[in-house]
Amino acid sequence: MSILELNKATIRFGGLVAVNEVSFSLNKGDLFGLIGPNGAGKTTCFNLITGVYKPTSGDIFFNGTAITGTPSNKIAKLGICRTFQNIRLFKALSVLENVVVGGFLRHETGLFSALTYLPGSIKETEKLRADAMELLKVVNLEQVAHVRSADLSYGMQRRLEIARAMATGPELLLLDEPAAGMNPLEKEELLKMVRKIRDEHGMTVLLIEHDMRFVMNLCERIVVLDHGEEIAQGPPSAIRNDPKVIAAYLGEAV
Amino acid sequence: MKFWIIRILSIVGAIGGCFAIQGIAHTQNDYTQRLIILAGLYVTLAVSLNLINGITGQFSIGHAAFYQVGAYLSGFLSVRFFQSAHLPPMVWLFCMMLAGAAAAAVAGLVVGLPSLRLKGDYLAIVTLGFGEIIRIQVQNTPALGGSYGLNVEPKIQSTAFVWLLAVLCVAVCRNLLKTAHGLPFLAVREDEVASSAMGVNVTRIKVSAFILGSAFAGAAGALLASYEGFITPATFAMDVSFIILTMVVLGGTGSITGSVISAMFLSYLPEYLRGLKDSGGGPLTLSGGTVIAWMVAVVTTVAVIRWIYSDGGRPRLQRFYGLIGAIVGGFVVQLAVGTGLNHINKLHDAKVEVGQLRMVIFAMTLIVLMLLRPQGVFAHHEFSWNWVSKLFKRGKGATA
Ligand SMILES: Nc1ncnc2c1ncn2[C@@H]1O[C@H](COP(=O)(O)OP(=O)(O)OP(=O)(O)O)[C@@H](O)[C@H]1O
Ligand SMILES: [Mg+2]
């Protein structure tokens, strides 16, 4: 059974059809790429899946149940978490605290226990911080755990976004242009990191990326959007030679 | 085990401290006692508003409304039921605090639920409007004394309770920030979209902050009512909300330490100003020329300081001398402009009592702060022993 399925998902903003009857499905353990020129509707797809917007029509299924129109925070609890193209960290919080926010949805003690500083909530806090520290090791940020997240370099902020999303313990991880703004060396590391996330942490990954070399090297299957429409789908080798894709990226090497 | 010993000791210590404050207050005259009580109430109000505005990042400017709800409900209950309840006064006062807190919490929920979907300015307008609605409603309710006010019987005065509430409020906020539970509150302040993508129920967090903050304000209101023995709608006018807001902003939105210190400072400042005497023993007055000169001096000093600090490349020492120079220069400007203006008869003869300039001074303080340190005196920082020892070490390092 597919872990995620979009069935003719469509959203209109006024006259603009940002995503038009897009259908694709991911199997558990996929490394799946979502590509397309600027303004193709990729981020909007993420927003539909994570409940930021409700589709005008069409359905989205996660593990077989419809999640169309479910609010964001519930989607995260169901097991889908994402990063943002325009980095959205909790700037004033430390690197570690950012990740703890991600892990917080698994908390068990109530607010009262925290307000009265009971041992239960203290232990839980320690546990969440320890878990967060483990995740920071995965993305190589344990050295800067106590730095204010806004003070990190661009590449580090992107990796922190990944760690924060992973902290929610998702089955499906959505990465919106994780390599944007990274230098070639950082990209190389990121590539390995994403593979590791899939192989060792067992998460299914759907990622948007403009760097074609990156996508083609990493993803096993790719879907291509253009002007909100799906124009191709398949393994990298097929996508690379697809005339429609080449036309959409006219002039750019694919 | 050790945990509980420390816990019990600190609770006992806090209670002891509050009764010590009461002991000290009782050796003072009524006026000073009142100052000590008001300071405690303002600490509660500022710290609880800080939970809403600073920690959770909402912009409520009607905090006095919840203060009023607590005051009037407890006042009303006292008048009606104290006689028949046959409870010792202190127990009754405690019940009134709970009642005031509960009523204000309900009010917080009623205002919060529909309006917390609004952001920034819109929420501010709703809270402001709510404050005015409550005040005017009370003004037109004969059962609550209308605009004449409500006589609260019995008058129960307890400095210890006031400060216990303040300590409790600080402790609750501090505990929240010390555990992981505080992080979603801060996360909502930082970025709502990202928070909900991480599974945080944003509305629930905001409403929790609103309810909790309002409840503390309500409890403070109950204490005020029973302390004063008399409350009128004017006690809770809009400017009270603004004063509380000023306290939070001045201290640094988000900093509990900042709220506590600026609440004490700003509740004392107007009384201090009112208490200033001239050589003849009457209230200290300033001429119009002098007041204008002060404003000119403050504005120019601030402008110069901003200019000095706008160039980050300047060496530290140079900036420091520049700062001193700007302040000294400010006084010189004040003297010169003041002397000049006071030659104009009209400006010389127009006298203002310093105590009356309270709101002007608040406003000037805020403007200066916004220009020089928009994050507030304490910014996001909190007092901690760790921090003190670091400061101490840094000091020693410099001399060594
Ligand atoms: N909230 C919105 N209101 C109106 N139009 C929107 C909204 N969100 C997205 N759009 C429009 O939808 C289209 C697709 O946007 P989207 O951000 O999904 O593109 P993208 O494929 O992620 O592009 P990029 O590679 O530049 O990130 C754009 O034309 C954009 O202007
Ligand atoms: Mg995008």
Image (tube, rainbow, N blue to C red):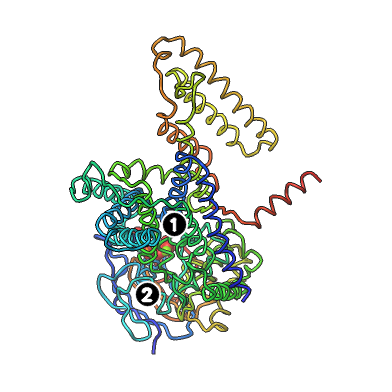
Pick the residue in front: B74 or A182.
B74
Q: For the residue marked with disc 1, what is the amino acid?
A: Leu
Q: Give the numbered dot on residue B71.
A: none
x and y percentages locating residue A253 in the rendered image: 50, 66
Q: Residue at x 24, y 60 (%)?
A: A15
Q: For the residue marked with disc 2, what is the amino acid?
A: Lys
Pick the residue in front: B188 or A206.
B188
Pick the residue in front: A168 or B393.
B393
Which-is-in-front pick, marks 2 and 1? Answer: 1
| Helix, strand or loop status at disc 1 | helix
Q: Is residue B229 visible?
A: yes
Q: Are the residues flagged by discs 2 and 1 in contact, CB closer than 8 Å? A: no
Q: Which residue is mark 2?
A: A74
Q: Chain of mark 2?
A: A
Q: Give the numbered dot on residue B51.
A: 1
Residue at far right of view? B400
Q: Residue at x 23, y 48 (%)?
A: B133
x and y percentages locating residue A208 in the rendered image: 46, 70
Judge from the rendering whether residue A169 lies leftward or rightward of residue A45; answer left or right: right
Q: Residue at x 37, y 58 (%)?
A: B89
